[in-house]
Amino acid sequence: MNRIIRITAALALTLSVASGAVSTAALAAGAAAISGEVKKIDEGAGKITLKHGPAKSLGMEEPMTMVYRVKDPVMLKQVKVGDKVTFEAEEAASGYTVTKMEKAK
Ligand SMILES: [Cu+2]
């Protein structure tokens, strides 16, 4: 009985340490999926305007509409104005940059 409790406790500890490491790493990279809607696409400038909900990982507590750069210009061809998307972004020296984006299902 005691042995089972100890194993369970050890397992729980291992799991919480592992998930803690993952969420810390995710936060460090600014990676957390954010839901948004495409408002404007500027292929020439490599920018996209996204309306999005709170994005705690980016320090944005309130919903907002803002302009993001994209890591890869191809991303701008995969969506159109009005699309609902989920995306990940990071704060780079050049500004907030979308690192991943896909149409919301
Ligand atoms: Cu924002």
Image (tube, rainbow, N blue to C red):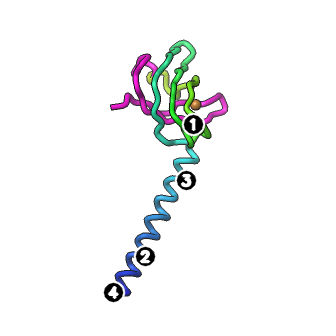
On the image, the x and y values in percent for residue 36 come to 47, 29
Say the numbered circle drawn on residue 42.
none
Residue under label 1, please give it.
90
Task: Work out how far the residue at label 3 is from the one at label 2, CA to CA, in angstroms.
Answer: 22 Å
Q: Which residue is the site of mark 3?
A: 24
Sequence-first tag of 3 and 4: 4
Q: Measure the C-alpha gap from mark 2 to mark 4.
A: 12 Å
* Element class at badge 4: loop
Image position of 3 (left or right of 49): left
User: How far is disc 3 from disc 4 in space, using C-alphas?
Assistant: 35 Å
**Which residue in the structure is indicated by mark 4?**
1
User: Mark 1 touching mark 3, by CB under 8 A?
Assistant: no
Q: Which label sits in the foreground, 3 or 4?
A: 4
* Identity, as a three-letter code, of the amino acid under mark 2: Ala
Q: Earlier in the sequence, mark 2 or mark 4?
A: 4
Could you tell me which residue is drawn at 40 percent across and 22 percent down? 83
Q: Does any atom of ligand 1 lie closer than 8 Å to the CB of label 2?
A: no
Q: Amino acid at mark 3?
A: Thr
Q: Based on the displayed image, in which of its 4 quarters is residue 95 positioned?
A: top right
Farthest front residue? 62
Majority SS type along the magenta span: strand
Region rendered in magenta: 76-105
User: Height in image: 26 above or below 90?
Assistant: below
Location of mark 2 (residue): 9
Q: SS for tag 3? A: helix
